[in-house]
Image: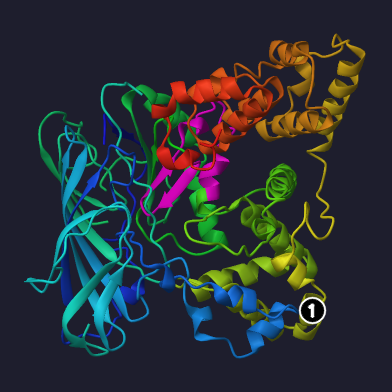
Amino acid sequence: MLALRKRGRGRKSRVPVEVWPRWLSQMTACDRMVSAKIRCEVSTQRAIPAFLPDRPCFRLPQNYRSRQYHSQAPKNTLRTMASSAAPVSQDRDLSTLSNYQDIRTDNIDLDWSIDWDKKTIGGTATLKLEAIKDVDEVVLDTSYLDIKDVTVDGKKALDEHIEAMGQALHVKLPSTLKKGQTKSGKYPYLYSQSQADTPAIKATYSSRVTSVLPVLMSALRQSPPSDEEPQYGKKIEYVYKQVTYKAFPDMEGRNWKTGVWTEPQTMKAAYWEFEEDTAKQVATAEDLTSAYRFGVYDFLILPNSFPYGGMENCCLTFATPTLLAGDRSLVDVIAHEISHIHGEPARMLSFTIGRVGLKESLKGYEDTPRFQKLLPDFKNHEDRDQVPYEKGSNFLLHLERTVGGLDHFIPYMKDYVKTFTNKSITTEQWHKHLFDWFGKQENGEEYLKKLDKVNWDEWIHGTGLDLCIDMQYDDSLSKPPTQLAERWAAAAKKGDLSQFKPEDVKDFDSTQKCVMLDHLYELGPKYQPEVATKLDEIYGFNQTQNAEIKLRFYKIALKSDWVITKGRMKFCRPIFKLLNEQNPELAKKVFKEHAEFYVSDKFAATRPI
């Protein structure tokens, strides 16, 4: 995986030997489980998924992906939709094209070898499958896999060679199964971004991966021990079950540990950044939702070209190096990967920041208003999530306020987690659960009257350039940076910036600095060059290690050199788009010069520049 080291410390934690969800041990004993072995190869030269975190991610033909029921939904309230007879398709997770409702994956055994010279991973994935209904075929989602052959119970089950790039993988079973039978620059990084298509299937996996560089997976390592010094140039077989290691100080009695993996060059900074808060955040998330059941909560700091803020794999969360701000100001991203955990003023400040991003996204979708909906009408391979994230969080805040605040909403949230763990649900099912739960509480009729007044149709299906109601947030933390931005805008018009001093922002945290820069940009995106120069000279925005602040500073300064050092699409896309508006030729020149640096999928929407 490259030159990796893990660091941590603390008490010995009581980690259970098996940490899988209980339902796996409670499954009805089967007379026969079918075993399918898939031999495949994946090329790493395209920066495509190499390690599959939970199960293979495949694709099926178009006719399996019907989303018709979205447009057929009644346009009154979701409560009507929940209480009326729903078509069968509403119970199906449309994010997967597999026949998971007929046959489900119980376990995956991976046996892989990494060829670093050829940039390929080859090997087998053996799936144990349990039939839920009478079935004579298993359909698996697949993407970017070169399938060599498939065997079922040792017999060949695939006649034709299946190329990579997502053809359907239909595997015929030997007979119909009845229900109940079933940074140094010295070494390369290789990481996956495949994700399981539906949370309704929870399968264990084991793996054996042979590599001359260290390998990490979202599982408990069996060998070699995680605390051993890494070896390079020697082929080693890494065995995972789902990690013995050193860890951060954990909470007394908690059944997990947490630590960080990264390159030796960044270990000191990474460990300092997260050692103080991560274990507390995981523990708080447990108190708010349910127990963390996987024994290990480690995270891996990836290289600068990693295009996402984080990806919450079991046992091993992927994290962007832009979190290493040097002042612990961005550790809330780890909390984001676990749960949203903030004090009330800080929570409202996050809503203020999110509202700015939401308005930008809604404006960007003026020509495609279906993407402005909280429940978008997606077509194939579309996964735009900015609007659902921000509009959805505001909708939940509105519901929280409707029922009386957090004291009333948190108990519901806990029941939601308990009810829908290991399941995939639709908006209609969630809506029914919400009304059912509050209806059963003391004063249930009062709750239902309040919920009935919510404009469900406008929230769920509405379009436009802002929310359907004017959401108000506590401004105790946002008001000072907003006022400072207004002073800057007024001074810029007069051409006199002498009044500003470093002390202006000495009491601001990183989020408040972002609010200040966002508001300054909104007040007048075209400033004289000296405004950006003074912002940097006085407040050091160009020197900060905090990429969120840099993003906003460069939106004002519109400098182009930063985009060749940070690969995360959240930062790069806006900079390239803004630069393209000002100087298209320069934008193309910079992008082409550094195109190999960027992960290919990340700029799919940006390449037309």
**Quarter where residue 349 is shown:** top right
Helix, strand or loop for disc 1 = helix
Count the numbered circles shown.
1
Q: Residue extending furthest left?
A: 154
Q: Nearer the viewer, residue 232 or 550?
A: 550
Q: Which of 307 and 411 is in front in this view?
A: 307
Q: Nearer the viewer, residue 85 or 301?
A: 85
**Quarter where residue 504 is shown:** top right
Task: Give the magenta part as a residue range.
Answer: 308-336
Residue 73, relative to residue 468: is it above or below?
below
Residue pointed to by mark 1? 452
Residue 433, relative to residue 253: is it above or below?
below
Observer able to see residue 516: yes
In magenta stretch: residue 321: yes
The residue sitting at 37% across, 52% down in the picture is 194
Badge 1: how crowded within 10 Å, few (<14), some, or many (20+)?
some
121 on left or right of 374: left
| Residue 145: % across, % down | 26, 53
| Amino acid type assigned to the residue bearing label 1 in the image | Asp
| Residue 570: % across, % down | 56, 38
Residue 484, relative to residue 196: is it above or below?
above
68 on left or right of 24: right
